[in-house]
């Protein structure tokens, strides 16, 4: 009997663990469905192959979605070829889904990502899937932490990508966050799979590509290969701390609430600086300020209404929102 390659085995174990930990609402008519987002690269190919093997053995169904961003010549044919491969190995449904990236806000990376996640979520809902599996590896996590550091992100950015995130009835799973990219590449070789090499991964136009090709290799050369593991470990530790802070923020926000979507200054003033600004950030999001545009500068201006009040006018937040201080309350200025 042929020996199972260790890289294939470790990825199957990761997929099995991720699905076992997710307990969907029981459906007596059919097993739950998990869809793998598969670009055709080594990470997502290895993930899809593992899901196709593991899922039916633990009472799940596994399918595949390949997104065609339409940004490169032949992208449609490639997405359809990935979907056809998925069908051949028993993934059902196995779909190629085109998206429109042009005209979306943000840079090309952000626009493509937004289009991709919208399409994945919509397709998953249409197919009745309870989970979408994403092929991000420990290397991707390390790159994410470095990008967050470079951009001056706070703890939420430094926490990296979560292994599991619930959004309504759908759960996003990243089973490979403890798997190195070299292992997914080895798994593809062991399974006789030929991954697609995305030219965007080496295009210096994109920040992540520069981190992948230059920054992270330089750190590994200077500090050793463990730097990738240590960056990913830092993300896990910060994510755990951030979860505690989120809980404390929710409690403090509830205590400061007053009727009419207002906050009591007295309740806010006694909070530690880091907690108070998190409460103000959360409140601004509740008022409708888009998170992508809500910056440290906006939160600092809100905080000044609490800690440095000298009769200044209202604070302007993204989305055309104005917040003013009325006596001992923070309140949104009515239109």
Image (tube, rainbow, N blue to C red):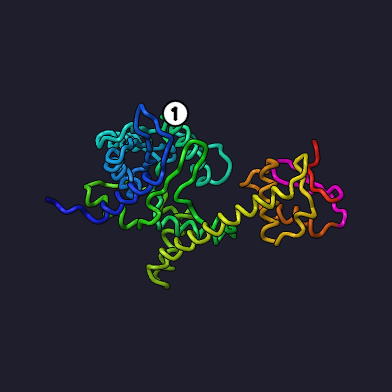
Q: Position of residue 147 (x, y in %)?
A: 51, 58
Q: Position of residue 126 (x, y in %)?
A: 44, 28
For the view shown, which residue lies furthest in the left direction? Answer: 1
| Residue drawn at point x = 43 percent, y = 55 percent | 140
| Residue drawn at point x = 29 percent, y = 54 percent | 10
Q: Position of residue 232 (x, y in %)?
A: 44, 60
Nearest the viewer among 33 and 216 is: 33
First to last magenta residue range: 310-327
Q: Is residue 270 above or below residue 281?
A: below
| Residue drawn at point x = 40 percent, y = 33 percent | 26
Quadrant the C terminus occupies: top right
Nearest the viewer among 160 and 114 is: 160
For the view shown, which residue lies furthest in the top direction? Answer: 29
| Residue drawn at point x = 81 percent, y = 59 percent | 308
Q: Which residue is mark 1?
A: 126
For the view shown, which residue lies furthest in the bottom direction? Answer: 222
């Amino acid at each position: 009997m042929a020996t199972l390659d260790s890289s294939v085995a470790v990825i199957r174990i990761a997929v099995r663990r991720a699905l076992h930990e997710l307990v969907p609402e029981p459906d007596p008519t059919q097993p739950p469905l998990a869809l793998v987002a598969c670009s055709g690269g080594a990470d997502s190919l290895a993930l899809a192959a593992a899901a196709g093997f593991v899922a039916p053995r633990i009472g799940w169904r596994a399918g595949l979605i390949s997104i065609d961003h339409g940004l490169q010549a032949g992208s449609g044919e490639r997405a359809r070829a990935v979907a056809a491969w998925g069908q051949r190995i028993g993934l059902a449904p196995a779909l190629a889904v085109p998206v429109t990236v042009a005209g979306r806000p943000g840079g090309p990376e952000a626009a493509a990502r937004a289009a991709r996640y919208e399409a994945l979520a919509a397709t998953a809902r249409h197919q009745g899937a309870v989970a979408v599996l994403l092929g991000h590896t420990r290397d991707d996590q390390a790159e994410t932490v470095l990008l967050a550091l470079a951009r001056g992100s706070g703890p939420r950015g430094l926490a990296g990508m979560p292994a599991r995130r619930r959004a309504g009835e759908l759960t996003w799973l990243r089973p490979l966050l403890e798997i190195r990219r070299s292992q997914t590449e080895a798994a593809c070789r062991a399974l006789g799979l030929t991954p697609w090499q995305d030219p965007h991964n080496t295009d210096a136009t994109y920040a992540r590509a520069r981190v992948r090709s230059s920054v992270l290799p330089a750190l590994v050369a200077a500090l050793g290969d463990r730097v990738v593991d240590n960056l990913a470990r830092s993300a896990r530790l910060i994510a755990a701390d951030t979860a505690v802070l989120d809980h404390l923020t929710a409690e403090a926000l509830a205590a400061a609430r007053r009727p009419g979507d207002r906050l009591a200054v007295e309740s806010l003033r006694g909070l530690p600086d880091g907690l108070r600004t998190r409460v103000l950030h959360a409140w601004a999001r509740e008022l409708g300020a888009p998170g992508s545009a809500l910056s440290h500068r906006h939160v600092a201006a809100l905080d000044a209404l609490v800690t440095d009040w000298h009769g200044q006018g209202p604070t302007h937040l993204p989305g055309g929102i104005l917040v003013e201080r009325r006596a001992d309350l923070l309140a949104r200025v009515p239109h």
